Image (spheres, grey):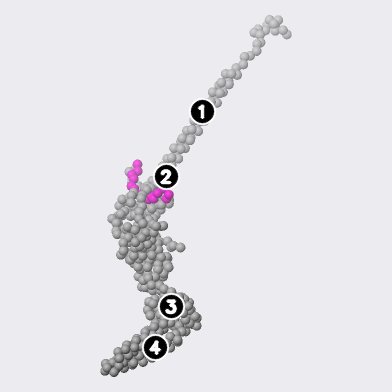
Amino acid sequence: MNIQTESHISGQPIKEKQAKRPVRMVRWFIIVGLLLALLVGALVGFNAFRSHMIAQFFANNKPPPANVSAVEAKTEVIPNLLTAVGDLVAVHQVNVTTDVPGRITEIQFTAGSHVKAGTPLVQLFDAPEQGDLANYKAQATVGELQLDRAKQLASRQFGPQSTVDTAQAAYDQAKAGIAKTEALISQKLVRAPFEGDLGVRQVEVGQYLTAGTQIVSLTDLSVLYANLTVTEKQSSQIKVGQAVRVSVDAYPGRTFEGKITTIEPQIATDTRNIRVQATIQNPDSILKPGMFATTTIVLPGKPPVVTIPETAVDYTLYGDSVFLITEKKGDDGKTTLTADRTFVKTGNRVEGRVEILKGLKAGDKVVAVGQIKLQSGMPVAISTDPPPPVPAEPPRY
């Protein structure tokens, strides 16, 4: 069948249909863009809502205040002390020796005992000297008789004066021999030169000693010297008669009192230090010469200063600081306590307290215990427990 020839079929000729894809694609792009915009807006809104709720949660759920111990800064007069190191020496200490050589015949002391001045210690062989002494005594007796006889004859004009002079010289010579021999005999008996305690015996009976051989040490422990050094700058603060406190490692926590008795008039050119000597009474004889000593010189007092316990100060490389407790009012009108880090300038430390030269005033409250868990501006609550005691001085090794 031919469409063109058929009359009963009406219409137009079939033509190719036009494409409408560009319109549909634009529509789809618009729809997808709107959906993406809605999705992004929802995400942004959700994140903003979540941040707001988190901030509100933490704002309404603040951590409880840190529990700390607090102390109040106070004004007091602290001792003005100058600390130095030194050692102890005996006022009287000697190694007992013999002046002359000889063989020991008797040891008359016990090692470690306490002896008086003049106590015999060692006897050396002195038989020859004893014989010489007897000879001189006999000569002195004869010389005295001859002198008396010569004087009687001379007084009666029966003898010349020269006979008296000769007899007098012989008698004096005999007495000089006695004195010399007695001195030699005394050298053979070694005695304690002063009262004190003996050390370890260094000799035995029968041993031959040469002059200067050490027999035993003798030390007087009743009084000791504390030798210490101070710097040239500190030398202007010390004077003879100032009190000195001495502590030693053997007796921690115990101090021994003394006074400055000697100040070296010259300053060492190599160290620029000056030597000071203090006299320490040692009635119990517990201090020993050679002990290392920490000495504290009591200087004239200073004006009152602000002090706090040492535990309240935080020592760092950036400076010394404390946590100052202050009162702050919140938005709700309630008063809270906060701890703010405050830098201070410290001075001397005496008996567990530290001098505050700058940064605090009397009456300020600071944290004494619990600084480790604090940050500046944190709320705190003051504990009702008493503050800790003053820490003991750590031992020295």
User: Residue 225 versus residue 356: which sits nearer the camera?
Assistant: 225
Whether residue 148 is visible to the viewer of this picture, yes or no, is no
- Marks 1 and 4, how far apart in space? 140 Å
Q: Residue furthest left?
A: 156
Q: Is residue 239 depicted above or below 63 in this figure?
A: below
Q: Rate crowding at label 1 as few (under 14), some (14 to 19) or many (20 or more) other CA atoms within 10 Å.
A: few
Residue drawn at x 42%, y 50% as measured from the top left = 316
- Disc 3 on helix, strand or loop? loop
Say whether residue 326 is magenta: yes
**Hey, what amino acid is under mark 3?**
Asp
- Disc 2 on helix, strand or loop? loop
Residue 7 placement, left or right of 46: right
> Which quarter of the rendered picture does the N terminus lie within?
top right
Q: Which residue is mark 1?
A: 37
Report the mark closest to the observer, 3 or 1: 3
Give the number of the disc on residue 99.
Answer: 3
